Image: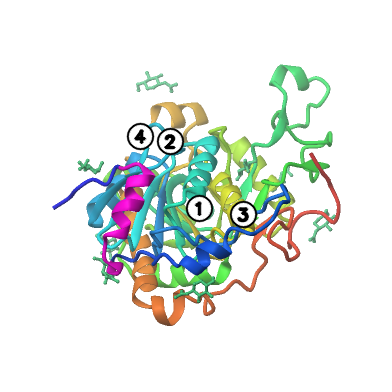
Amino acid sequence: MKFSTVLAIGSVLATAFSQPLSLGKRAINNTAIEDAIPPSTKNNIQASYGRPFSIYQPKVFIISMFSYERDPWLESLDFIHNITLPGLSPVYPTLYCTTNFTICQITTGEGEINAASSITALGLNPLFDLSKTYFLIGGIAGGEPAYTTLGGVTFAKYAVQVGLQYQLAYLDYIKEEPDWISGYVPYGVDDQYTYPANVYGTEVFEVNEALRNRAVELALKVELNNGTAQNAYIRSLYDEEVAQGLPTIFSCDVVTSDNYFTGNILNDYFSNLTKVLTNGSATYCSTAQEDNASLEAFTRLDKYGLVDFDRVLVMRTISDFSRPPPSINAVEFFFNTSQGGSSAAVANIVLAGTPIIHDILTNWDKVYEAGLKYQSKNYVGDILATLGGTPDFGKASFEVA
Ligand SMILES: *[C@@H]1O[C@H](CO)[C@@H](O)[C@H](O)[C@H]1NC(C)=O
Ligand SMILES: *[C@@H]1O[C@H](CO)[C@@H](O)[C@H](O)[C@H]1NC(C)=O
Ligand SMILES: *[C@@H]1O[C@H](CO)[C@@H](O)[C@H](O)[C@H]1NC(C)=O
Ligand SMILES: *[C@@H]1O[C@H](CO)[C@@H](O)[C@H](O)[C@H]1NC(C)=O
Ligand SMILES: *[C@@H]1O[C@H](CO)[C@@H](O)[C@H](O)[C@H]1NC(C)=O
Ligand SMILES: *[C@@H]1O[C@H](CO)[C@@H](O)[C@H](O)[C@H]1NC(C)=O
Ligand SMILES: *[C@@H]1O[C@H](CO)[C@@H](O)[C@H](O)[C@H]1NC(C)=O
Ligand SMILES: *[C@@H]1O[C@H](CO)[C@@H](O)[C@H](O)[C@H]1NC(C)=O
């Protein structure tokens, strides 16, 4: 039986005291409560690490961006708790949890602003202790035919934000700069392929490669949905062998931009810019509108011990090609050609995401709670080294704007 837990925090807390601990809730520890209120007259106050008062400690949090990505999870898992939190998207104000709050699911809303706001609201809500939670960002995305195909599943190591740039309209630059391939120019420079002179700090994120590789290893064992006959026909129009093939699991990187770009020129440009921004390390294969925004929120939360950035996975399945095949122009392809629908991409979110979730739950005590076995060996975090370490991308010095 499904029931709703749409409650104000006060009454949830009240309920919690009367619930058995087997629900995965943390016992209230009076010593910790006293410790958490420092006897100080200083007014420069720093919140404590972790969450001494929180109730729920999910092992896995699934992150979807809109209903289409969420619904297959609602069908596949037995979510019975509906929890409405302040600060979530007005379109998706409710998150869902399974029986014992082991697995939860949140829908952020689409685009960078929605993703950053919703993840921040979740991370700061006092109900949840997410310091050991694994996060699986699972969404659909556009795909580069050189590296992936319709229905394919990509797990990223880098998320690169390519939209933070100057932009000029074609007629405004073409006389003076006939060689520019688009109107985009990185901040603080006047050349399209130069590392930006100033950055906002959200341009590049790098996540745990060891955990990513574990998710890939497990997902490779499942049989993916191959998609529709029209998906197969569209794949056959491309020259690239990967595009022509059936969906499988790919390790390659995601770019984020609120600006939904398509076509050969911008895909070439953003592909090259991804190389510039990561010193050649990242390979752009999927394009979406949220990932570095969610990762920015996770970085800020990790900084205060509220989440562990090492436990974030970014999975994007390919719903459509981001550039046309040689026989069709970009406008006709984008506005007037069916690529066969995204049923395979949506089905494969669950098919490819379930093995790592299962692994986390099955081996929680032995492996995942401590998080040592798949601890990152690569740099993780943002361009500003907010979480420590030394980024293996970026420039030795730049101006932070
Ligand atoms: C909980 O949310 C699900 C999914 O939106 C919905 O189907 C269900 O009716 C909700 N339950 C209650 C009691 O509101
Ligand atoms: C309660 O919290 C204190 C301080 O954080 C800690 O030392 C102690 O081990 C905790 N007790 C239990 C039973 O968790
Ligand atoms: C929590 O629920 C899941 C799914 O129903 C189950 O597999 C798991 O064993 C439960 N865990 C605990 C601690 O009860
Ligand atoms: C998000 O990532 C995209 C490319 O992946 C980048 O262009 C954009 O600047 C990033 N946005 C933020 C807010 O980090
Ligand atoms: C996808 O196609 C491959 C190759 O033909 C096949 O082995 C596999 O069973 C198909 N998957 C599904 C779910 O039908
Ligand atoms: C962009 O990258 C492609 C492939 O790496 C390369 O062939 C092309 O020359 C680059 N374009 C520019 C303008 O740098
Ligand atoms: C879209 O398709 C229709 C019917 O095939 C055709 O008449 C029209 O010219 C196409 N539009 C574009 C922009 O290709
Ligand atoms: C990345 O490339 C830039 C520009 O070539 C260079 O200044 C910087 O030192 C490189 N950064 C790393 C971490 O290799």
Q: In this orientation, which residue lies closer to the viewer: 299 or 167?
A: 299
- Identify the residue under disc 1: 240
- Identify the residue under disc 3: 47
Residue 315 in percent (x, y) is at 46, 56
Q: Amino acid at mark 4?
A: Ser
Magenta stretch encompasses residue 13:
yes
Q: Give the numbered dot on residue 89.
A: 2
Q: Kindly report the distance in space between the C-alpha atoms of the residues bearing marks 3 and 1.
A: 52 Å
SS at mark 2 in the image: loop
Question: In terms of image quadrants, where is residue 270?
Answer: top right
Q: Residue at the location (26% across, 61% down)?
A: 19
Disc 1 packing (10 Å; few <14; some 14–19; many ≥20)? some
Q: Residue at the location (50% across, 41% down)?
A: 115
SS at mark 4 in the image: loop
Secondary structure character of the magenta stretch overall: helix
Magenta stretch encompasses residue 375:
no
Residue 26 in percent (x, y) is at 39, 65
Among the two numbered marks 2 and 1 on one chain, the one whose residue lies closer to the N terminus: 2
Magenta residues span 7-22
Question: In terms of image quadrants, where is residue 192?
Answer: top right
Among the two numbered marks 3 and 2 on one chain, the one whose residue lies closer to the N terminus: 3
